[in-house]
Amino acid sequence: MIDVLSTNIVSPIGGTAYENYKVIKAGLSSVTKHDDQHILPETICASLFKEASLNKYLHPGLTKFESLVYYSISEALQRVRIESGARTILILASTKGNIENLRSNGLRVNLAESASVLAKAIPVVSDYVVVCNACISGASAQLLALRLIESDCYDYAIVCGADVTGQFIASGFSSLKALSSEPCRPFDMERNGLNLGEAAATIIYGKGGNSCESSWHLQKGAIRNDAHHISNPPSNAEGCYLAIKSVLADNIVPACVSVHGTATLFNDQMEAVALHRAGLSDVPVLALKGYYGHTLGATGVLETILSMYCVDDKETVPAVGYSEQGVSYPLNISASPIPIAGDDFLKIISGFGGCNAALYFFNGSSQHTEALEVPILRTTHRITITSDGVILDNKSVEVEGSGKSMITALYKKYINDYPRFYKMDMLSRVALIASELLIQAENPRVCDTEDRAIIFFNHSSSIVADCAYLATLTEDNYYPSPSVFIYTLPNITAGEIAIRNNYYGETSFYILKEKSERLMNEILSSTFMDKGIRSAICGWINCDREDFFEVELFIKERY
């Protein structure tokens, strides 16, 4: 259990968390129509910063994305005192960060470099990591904070989720037919897609000496994959259901459920199924996308903060856009406020790559929690892949060619039954080959589909796929490719492996400025504090160019 020490939200609605809450409590939305040819050739509905309001948040030497992060963290830090010399980690959650700079040579695009610049600008930060786990990034970052503080690696965690919208992101969601040209309508029978939004949201976490009757705490969290499809959720909501059941004890029914509620046809239906399976259909539902749109990496943090305000006020805010139920299982959702009888809530969220997260929060004096120990791990198999060769368990693997051709030859020789391989970006292809060779080395083959995690680290995110997708957005030949766009999310690498092997455990992706064995080991060890995880395929997987990659993966297990 860790304590919420301070919060902030910077959005088109306002520059503080309370300012944002006051506006949405009144039922006012920041989602409006935009006609901007620099974003999309057609009209979209979105929650975007206007230039006049944005200027007060901009900081010299920082991009728009970085400025929003810096402002949000700085504002949150004003209300908490972090002792000199304290171990404080910055956990930045984002899907694409400065991706709109990709066409501009010399401007920062890499998320790890943005985190490095921000860490230097914030004096209390002693370490940093980027969580890039698609739409659940903000929830994943909070779960990482819980693990790293509870494992005594850090005293404080500054969690900030942020994303901004431009042509790259908007065209990608448009290519997937996911955008609505009207304000979104979560869970409504007339829903037809999501709206995008911009925001930065911060929660500062700590532990010990901060608990009181009015304190919020993050007690538990989990991530589970649905092992179904990289962009469509399963009809049985297995991943979301498993995440919920991993977090809630049998006798706990939260006072409120803060849902993802993107207003897409399948996501809303999936969440309704998951809540029904978990016995939570009668619990008041808090759906916030009608106010902000989908703020991507900020979503999990922003909606957590606003959920705290709602539970404190003992009622939900109106579900903007909702009129008549459009999912197959009943939900306690309304366009009017619903009373909340209790002091806790469950936050659920899902994303591309089949990832699902659940977090449980409560407000009040410290509750008894089970003592968590950082487990001892052992490495059972190891693989190293470079552009020129493969070493598996200290033995060279015979290869043909080098670079991309070598990976294709390895696929034909050792797999050759997964046709989607040829649609994947290079990062995902290399990850699939490395994981398959590791799995084949297990003798007898381990069939732990429910408790095997996939945890990857790298430096360059999905830069090869990013450049490939950007090439589909030229003025002379504008054809946004959905099959290319989906791989601009690096966590898809882990999702593909989960789908291939029916792994329902955690899938997570982290970006570091450099390969740090210490930080990687801290994150991996703390991940195994989740007793639902028994083994993991994990390690470093970086691909700067199609013919240049560096892989060092392991299978790790509990002793």
Image (spheres, rainbow, N blue to C red):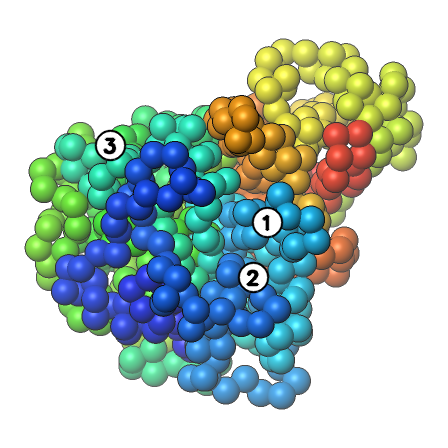
Q: On the image, numbered disc 3 is attached to which residue?
A: 192
Q: On the image, numbered disc 1 is attached to which residue?
A: 101
* Residue 35 seen anywhere in this rendered image of the structure: yes
Q: At which x and y percent is residue 373?
A: 58, 62
Q: Nearer the viewer, residue 329 or 531?
A: 329
Which of marks 3 and 2 precedes in the sequence? 2
Residue at image point 69% right, 15% down: 415
Residue at image point 62% right, 80% down: 123
Discs 2, 3 touching: Cβ within 8 Å: no
Task: Tell me the amino acid under the disc marked 3.
Answer: Asn
Q: Secondary structure at mark 3?
A: loop
Check residue 480 in the rendering and tell me which mark sits there, or answer none. none
Q: Secondary structure at mark 2?
A: loop
Task: Tell me the amino acid under the disc marked 2.
Answer: Thr
Density class for disc 1 (Cα within 10 Å; few <14, some 14-19, many ≥20) is some
Q: Height in image: 454 above or below 424?
A: below
Corner quadrant of residue 233: top left
Q: Height in image: 126 above or below 410?
A: below
Corner quadrant of residue 154: bottom right
Q: On the image, numbered disc 2 is attached to which residue?
A: 63
Discs 1, 2 touching: Cβ within 8 Å: yes
Q: At which x and y percent is residue 382?
A: 79, 37
**In which quadrant will I find the N terminus?**
bottom left
